Image (cartoon, grey):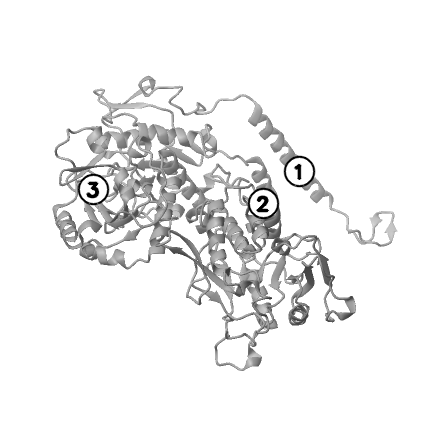
Amino acid sequence: MCASGKYNSRGPALIPRMKIKHRIYYITLFSVVLLGLVATGMFQFWPHSIESTADWTLDKRSIHDAPLIRLPVSSPIPERGDLSCRMHTCFDVYRCGYNPKNRIKVTVNPPQLPKLKYALIFLVLMLLHCYALQVYIYPLQRFADELGVPISSTGLSREYNDLLSAISDSDFYTDDVTRACLFIPSIDVLNQNSLRIRETAQALAMLPRWDKGMNHLLFNMLPGGPPDYNTALDVPRDRALLAGGGFSTWTYRQGYDISIPVYSPLSADVELPERQPGPRRYFILSSQTAIHREYRAELERLKEENGEALLLLDKCSNLSQGAASARKRCYKGQVYDYPQILQESSFCVVLRGARLGQATLSDVLQAGCVPVILADSYILPFSEVLDWKRASVVIPEEKLSEMYTILKSIPHRQVEEMQRQARWFWDAYFSSMKAVGLTTLQIINDRIYPYAARTYEQWNNPPVVKWSSVNSPLFLPLIPPRAPGFTAVVLTYDRVESLFRVITEISKVPSLAKLLVVWNNQNKSPPEESLWPKVSVPLKVVRTKENKLSNRFFPYDEIETEAVLAIDDDIIMLTSDELQFGYEVWREFPDRLVGYPGRLHLWDHEMGKWKYESEWTNEVSMVLTGAAFYHKYFNYLYTYKMPGDIKNWVDAHMNCEDIAMNFLVANITGKAPIKVTPRKKFKCPECTAIDGLSLDQTHMVERSECINKFASVFGTMPLKVVEHRADPVLYKDDFPEKLKSFPNIGSL
């Protein structure tokens, strides 16, 4: 914008002149900033040497070739570990400044300046330090005492080598120690049994950037030792973060430490194909070999009570000890392959041993068996982000005798979902040392950048979009703007009287922006313009070239609003309040299908396939698009990105386009639809079986076939079951109608 005014010899009268001293100040500031940019650029590209820039890799350097560091007896020993440590007290977040990739990195603390100067310099600092690399791994070194005895009996284990190699190959890694936010020693402390505690602590204290363990991360899976088996690493470690495999509620520093799984070596040696969820040969299976005698006695009692439903395995006494025997389990002389036998049970027992963390948990998850965890005070792996209620059953140890009854009370469908979730947890977070390491770093990264952290859904919902590169519509605003309203798309064929009634009712909705009638009858012209109802919004009639149900989801240019209301020409019982409320709910959940007729999919155990359910139940997994709001983005996906032959199959069978849309949206978002208002009857009473497709006798059978067909094409069952609906806040309250925003909400 420019200000207009009279000019004099000194310039515009309305624009004050900048004082000479201010002009000099800003010119100087700009010069300093420019010089800083030039200097930083030269520093970035000019060859230079820092503390250590060697890539971390065992391919280039064997542990046997690493330099030997002797530890004097008088070397300092870190403090045991501060149980009060939290991210805001024992972690220097100022090493980890802003960067576009939301990754941990180094930052510079700006001096205290006036607000304008502070803002300018802070912006410059953000430009200067947008590095994406952030985790530094110390170079390999061998540590020994003054007599030359190593601090570890095993050196660098294969598991720790795999872990460090995975981190060095990831986006988290930097070989520039000055940029690092997090430091990982190359000292292997995964297994405390192999360590000399005092000497290992001295080696940690000798690390050049140890600084009382600040911003250092240690990985340990087997803590403690006989006789007490502490649940956290006994090596004194100052303020270092600990990724531990056996934390209890007494040793876990919540929000600081990370509970990780105990890696199972069988993961790398045995490949178990994923098995479809469902009933298994055994109901409960116990495969651990070092169970306390009291627990084993209780399991044997349960076995006597429940017979073949419970399989109680133990180590094989008639086999020689070795790698082969580790993969075998026995029951009364019968030998079973382990971990393959785990796939034959619905539930698998995971009992505490000498340590709380057990590698059996990983084996059970890999088998797709629901773990039944009996380990009081155990902090489950990655429980900071993973919802274990979806993949396991946790039972107090004192209720082991009630285990069978507790598990029998879980519905079959829930068991199947838990089996599926258990296997996905293993694939995503347990399957390799790489998965364990990168998950740990991602959790720390989310703590430092909470505004860019992964959501609950991203951590816990399997990614099911495998058939295209289309992004999920979660880029949408949290609440779309109210002004545009919605476009009502009415699919019709020949029911003119009913169509006009629908248009008349919809036109009463305050947020309606446009009416679009999709005329699907090629043998008959739509009524003359003078016969159509008079409405206050634009009304457009689109004539299709073929009679296809998919025409209702075509991305017509006439749809200019984000929100679309798909509605059939016989849905006349919805009131304007119900429709307006549905739109308001959609505005808060623009990535969901928000609709009125609710339906459910069920697994038929006798038939071994899915079936369609339209009875009134407590659950909903679909809302029919005969009356539903959704984002127009899904029109594009339905028309151009629908997987397989689903779209052609729908048009050929003239059925199930609404189920296909439910599959599509659930597959993209991983979320369930939202049913609004209590009404369950929607169609006009006059509509006969001849007029109404959904009243055909074969309708239910065909709908079940659709669900099985679509699940086969998608390669999964994306539909989510929920037990709630959305109603207006004062819907049933005893208030005067004039105080309610939506007074005219139908009951049925």
Q: Nearer the viewer, mark 2 or mark 1?
A: 2
- Quadrant of residue 206 within the rendered picture: top left
Nearest the viewer among 269 and 257 is 269
Q: Earlier in the sequence, mark 3 or mark 1?
A: 1
Vertical position of residue 625 compared to residue 375: above or below: below
Which residue is at 56% across, 55% downward?
657
Vertical position of residue 647 compared to residue 512: above or below: above
Residue matched to label 3 = 288
Which residue is at 21% across, 42% downward?
287
- Quadrant of residue 563 within the rendered picture: bottom right
Give percent across and percent down for residue 96.
47, 40
Residue matched to label 1 = 30
Which residue is at 27% across, 44% downward?
344
- Mark seen at residue 641: 2
Q: Name the kind of residue labelled 1 in the image.
A: Phe
> Looking at the image, which residue sits at the far bottom?
736
- Mark seen at residue 241: none
Nearest the viewer among 30 and 235 is 235
Q: SS for tag 3?
A: loop
Q: Earlier in the sequence, mark 3 or mark 2?
A: 3
Q: Name the kind of residue labelled 3 in the image.
A: Gln
Give percent across and percent down for residue 451.
50, 49
Residue contact at pointers 3 and 2, CB within 8 angstroms = no
Would residue 76 be seen by someone viewing this image from the given angle?
no
- Sort mark 3 into few (<14), some (14-19) or many (20+) by Cα contacts within 10 Å: many
Q: Name the kind of residue labelled 2 in the image.
A: Lys
Would residue 646 be seen by someone viewing this image from the given angle?
yes
- Disc 3 from disc 1: Cα separation: 69 Å
Q: How many marks?
A: 3
Q: Nearer the viewer, mark 3 or mark 2?
A: 2
For residue 126, side relative to residue 460 (left or right): right
